[in-house]
Image (cartoon, coloured by chain):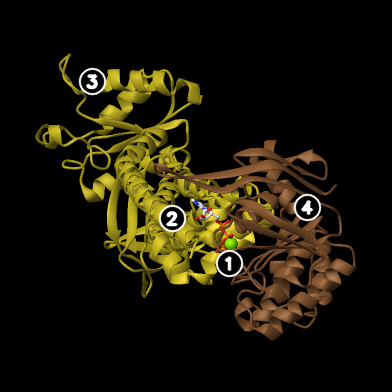
Chain colours: A brown, B yellow
Amino acid sequence: MLIELKNIVKDYQLGMDTVHALRGVDLKIQKNEYVAIMGPSGSGKSTLMNLLGCLDTPSSGIYRLNGSNVSEMDDDHLAEIRNREIGFVFQNFNLLPRASSAHNVELPLIYNGTPAAKRKELAEKALKKVGLGDRMHHRPNELSGGQRQRVAVARALINNPSIILADEPTGNLDTRTGDEIMDLFEELHESGNTIILVTHEEYIAEHSDRIIRLRDGKIERDEAK
Amino acid sequence: MQVQESFYIALDVIRTHKMRSFLTLLGVIIGVTAIIGMQSLIEGFQKDMQEQMEQLGSNVFQVQRDPVMMGGGRHRDQEKKRKNITLDESDAISQYCTSVEQVGPEAWHFGITVKYKDKKTSPVMVLAGGQSAFFPNNGYFVEQGRAITDTDDQYNRNVAVIGMDIVDELFPFQNPLGEEINVDGRHYEVIGVIEKQGGRFGDSNDNRVVIPLNTFLKYYGNRERSLNITVSVKDPAMMEAAQEQVIGVLRAVRKVPPGEPNDFEIWTSDSLMERFNNMTRAVRIGAIVIVSFSLLVAGIGIMNILLVSIRERTREIGVRMAIGAKRRDILFQFLMEAVLLSEIGGIIGILAGVGIGQLVALISPVPAAIPVWTIVIGFFFCSLVGVIFGVYPAAKASRMDPIESLRYE
Ligand SMILES: Nc1ncnc2c1ncn2[C@@H]1O[C@H](COP(=O)(O)OP(=O)(O)OP(=O)(O)O)[C@@H](O)[C@H]1O
Ligand SMILES: [Mg+2]
């Protein structure tokens, strides 16, 4: 089992009020699954993704990733997990604006001490994989939205993570470029990656094998195709 | 994360915001420039003084009537009334002071013109009257011919030992020995040439014409003229004992009542150097205070700019954390930025300071040295300022919440 969530609760304290973002989520995801998470705004999708991505820890419940209990890890350990096991793709790309594509892509390798020559080689490979072999030295503002998102995907891939987490990866793209990104995910899935993505669009979710629907911090429906 | 990486990030940030970085650095630059420039000149001056003072070897001290350099102002009036130091006193020293080796009474006359046939030197030469001890005690080595002897002195001979400047001006292609030079209408036979001494800013030590002391006193009068006496001891360890003896003898001969201060001065190379160092100490302390303040101000500037930078790059911090940067990686990155920033300021300041020192040395007679230690310490303090004022912003950055940072607009 790659991911195992048991009764995950996430509360946010907003002054006197407590916001219950997740109210007891149980979830199991296998290796090489392609999962779409859907649900209305505010239903807890991003909160769930952040927990899965080890950017945050649950208020209660247990999260096992590859068998180890993430809910009990300290900051440094979580950073290592994020570096090794998780690849993030964000709606707004989140590339470093002043860095070239190649540098953006090699960034995760910098934080695990990969030597520069090796980093360069891997970054080049990853960029070729997403079809940007000829855009190595471009900066984000010299790329189209679709190309930026590809750079982000290449960055997510570079460390061979167990999971690729994409929170509305096509949200800032037009339909055609969105489809290109989805084709890319398809390829990654076929080559053995585990993909979890959040989307509001049914036709995007259609690309996946399994759709999980959240409502008010709970799983409302979980259906495989 | 590798040091190299954070170095490049920091460098890139500084390069991107050149103007902003420069303005932030101004405090560091000004402070460091000030201290390095000042120290260049002080050390240059000091080195020069030292060279000059080493003419009096470590086993020689000098007795003279008036204080050297700016002695304490309190006794000014009393000092003016001091009696001249005479040949008799010099003789008393050689007679009664057992620890001394050679006693060299001497007299000086500045700004003379030396003539030879139809040639004459510029009017900047110095006439000295001395005895045989004049040469060893002042560190003059006679390389051609011979020095003044006691016989020369005894018989008021018109002989002269000349410095290289005079040789260069009057005898460029000629052996000066045996030639007759003319000073103030009196003729002297050149009997020796002093080895080249080298100069000290603008002033030369090679412009000397040394004649027997008695000859000097005959022509230039001995009534109103106070002599200087150089005294050498056999062993530098006996310096103090010898000085005590000389003081005792002089007080007795000059009839200084017990309890009164000496009405003459004694100095050694060391004591002069010490005096000089005391004089420059105030300047140094002033410089350090100025620099401390400007580094403090600069440090606050660096802290401020770093806080701005962190605000601007909140998302970047979030991204870095999301892809695996640990908190200490972020801390280190911003600390590196602060240190690099202040070190760049330090380097610019050091270069500017050394440059200014050299420039002043070039266009004025003031010498300049490159103050290695001040540079090392200055650089160290710049780094320290970077660390001290970088810690708070860097720690703040490292404690940011990755999710919040990623969402930051
Ligand atoms: N840092 C926070 N502090 C307080 N409340 C929060 C915080 N983050 C999320 N929430 C709340 O938790 C709930 C779930 O938010 P979440 O961002 O997971 O929704 P979402 O399903 O991703 O919505 P959207 O589709 O609009 O992105 C919301 O009510 C939100 O206001
Ligand atoms: Mg969301």
Determine whether the beta carbon of the residue marked 1 sits less than 8 angstroms from the nearest atom of ligand 1: no
Asked if labels 4 and 3 touch by Cβ distance under 8 angstroms, the answer is no
Question: What residue does disc 1 label?
Answer: B12
Q: CA distance from mark 1 to mark 3?
A: 74 Å
Q: CA distance from mark 4 to mark 1?
A: 29 Å
Relative to A197, residue B55 above or below: above
Q: Position of residue A103 (x, y in %)?
A: 70, 68
Q: Earlier in the sequence, mark 1 or mark 3?
A: 1
Q: Position of residue B260 (x, y in %)?
A: 16, 19
Q: Say the numbered circle drawn on residue A85.
A: 4
Instruction: Provide the secondary structure element on which disc 2 rests.
Output: helix
> At x 28% / y 60%, what residue is drawn?
B111
Q: Say the numbered circle drawn on residue B307.
A: 2
**Residue type at the position of mark 3:** Arg
- The residue mark sitting in front, 1 or 3, is 1
> At x 84% / y 74%, what residue is drawn?
A129
Q: CA distance from mark 3 to mark 2?
A: 71 Å
Q: Residues within 10 Å of mark 4 (few under 14, many from 20)?
A: many
Look at the image and tell me whether residue B174 can be seen. Answer: no
Instruction: Provide the secondary structure element on which disc 3 rests.
Output: helix
Where residue A63 sits, quadrant-wise, is top right
Determine whether the beta carbon of the residue marked 4 sits less than 8 angstroms from the nearest atom of ligand 1: no
Question: What residue does disc 3 label?
Answer: B251
Instruction: Provide the secondary structure element on which disc 1 rests.
Output: helix
